[in-house]
């Protein structure tokens, strides 16, 4: 099973990210190359990158299983302020070249929110923007993430994703499924094989290069986008276990983006990553009733 989680990218950059992933017994990882909510970015350190790649090699982590997530302030759908739209495009280009410096092959992107535009206009803006960025020569492939359909988010249906892909001149672009988002946008994850059949009528299964594996706090079709820990949400452990073990997606890296476990220490809230324990559950195939307590005890 190719499985990992969201990890940090701090002073030690890529090297620190790989170390963190190894601490979770992961063989895949995903990170933002800076804060997700802003566009401040440090220069990529060549030495740290070389060390990260070496560490990956020694631990059998394939570079195809390393994913970068683009910051969510990039919005290609909203063209109301031309300046902001242009900035999103240039920032995305910059993020792609940072991925190339790191050797990373996949960059996950939220298609965008149309805000005051119609959905159709929003999607056209995304297509126009992506045509400035995506081309056959890119060494890193952009993956459009399936969205929950919160607010004016575009890309919450397979049809919308297809419309975007069809509008792009280059085929050097793929898809990232997010199980929480799919549930929240109205797809039944409890019938995942049925979902994949439906998917295959619309899109090529080979386009899927990453899966975000999350449980959801909300019911199908809620359009909320609030992730839950594995087995503690409306998808449930058995459903998620079936998804991560699906034979058609066995070579696709699975990335957990579940929430940190909180603990109140006097008045201070401490937060611990659940990933080591969630990965263990999914590898073992057995639900850990004590997930939160085990995480707290481990990090305390
Ligand atoms: Fe995302
Ligand atoms: Fe996601
Ligand atoms: Zn989400």
Image (cartoon, rainbow, N blue to C red):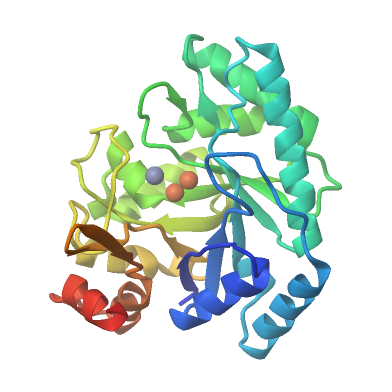
Question: x, y (%) of residue 200?
Answer: 48, 46
Residue projecting furthest to the front: 266
- Check the image and report above or below for 80 versus 37: above
**Left or right, 253 with reference to 152:** right
Q: Quadrant of residue 219?
A: top left
Q: Quadrant of residue 193?
A: bottom left
Residue 89 visible in the current orientation:
yes
Question: x, y (%) of residue 51?
Answer: 74, 80
**Left or right, 134 with reference to 7:** right
Question: x, y (%) of residue 20?
Answer: 51, 75
Residue projecting furthest to the right: 137
Q: Nearer the viewer, residue 65 or 90?
A: 90
Instruction: Tell me the residue at 50%/28% (across/down).
Output: 160
Q: Nearer the viewer, residue 5 or 295?
A: 295
- Check the image and report above or below for 42 versus 151: below
Q: Nearer the viewer, residue 269 or 298?
A: 269
Quarter of the figure that contains the N terminus: bottom left
Count how many numbered circles sit on residues in the image. Answer: 0
Q: Nearer the viewer, residue 228 or 8?
A: 8
Instruction: Tell me the residue at 75%/63% (across/down).
Output: 102
Question: x, y (%) of residue 172?
Answer: 74, 45
Quarter of the figure that contains the C terminus: bottom left
Instruction: Tell me the residue at 21%/47% (across/down).
Output: 217
- Check the image and report above or below for 152 versus 91: above
- Check the image and report above or below for 107 versus 166: below
Residue 168 visible in the current orientation:
no
**Left or right, 258 with reference to 6:** left
Residue projecting furthest to the left: 289
**Left or right, 170 with reference to 222:** right
Instruction: Tell me the residue at 28%/63% (across/down).
Output: 270
């Amino acid at each position: 099973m190719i499985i990992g989680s969201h990890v940090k990218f701090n002073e030690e950059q890529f090297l620190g990210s790989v170390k963190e992933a190894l601490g979770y017994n992961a063989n895949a990882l995903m990170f933002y190359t800076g804060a997700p909510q802003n566009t401040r970015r440090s220069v990529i350190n060549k030495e740290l990158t070389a060390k990260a790649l070496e560490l990956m090699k020694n631990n059998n982590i394939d570079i195809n299983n390393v994913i970068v997530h683009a910051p969510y302030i990039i919005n290609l759908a909203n063209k109301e302020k031309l300046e902001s739209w242009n900035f999103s495009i240039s920032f995305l280009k910059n993020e792609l070249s940072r991925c190339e410096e790191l050797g990373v092959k996949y960059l996950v992107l939220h298609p965008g929110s149309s805000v005051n535009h119609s959905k159709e206009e929003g999607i056209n803006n995304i297509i126009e923007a992506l045509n400035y960025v995506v081309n056959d020569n890119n060494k890193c492939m952009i993956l459009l993430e399936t969205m929950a359909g919160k607010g004016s988010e575009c890309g919450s249906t397979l049809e919308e994703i297809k419309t975007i892909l069809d509008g792009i001149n280059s085929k050097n672009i793929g898809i990232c499924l997010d199980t929480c988002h799919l549930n929240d946008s109205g797809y039944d994850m409890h019938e995942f094989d049925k979902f994949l059949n439906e998917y295959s009528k619309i899109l090529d299964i080979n386009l899927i290069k990453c899966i975000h594996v999350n449980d959801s706090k909300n019911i199908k079709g809620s359009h909320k986008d609030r992730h839950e820990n594995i087995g503690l949400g409306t998808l449930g452990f058995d459903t998620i276990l079936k998804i991560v073990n699906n034979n058609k997606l066995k070579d696709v890296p699975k990335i957990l983006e579940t929430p940190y476990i909180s603990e109140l220490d006097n008045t201070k809230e401490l937060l611990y990553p659940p990933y080591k324990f969630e990965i263990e559950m999914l590898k073992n195939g057995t639900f850990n009733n004590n997930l939160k307590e085990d995480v707290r005890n481990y990090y305390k």
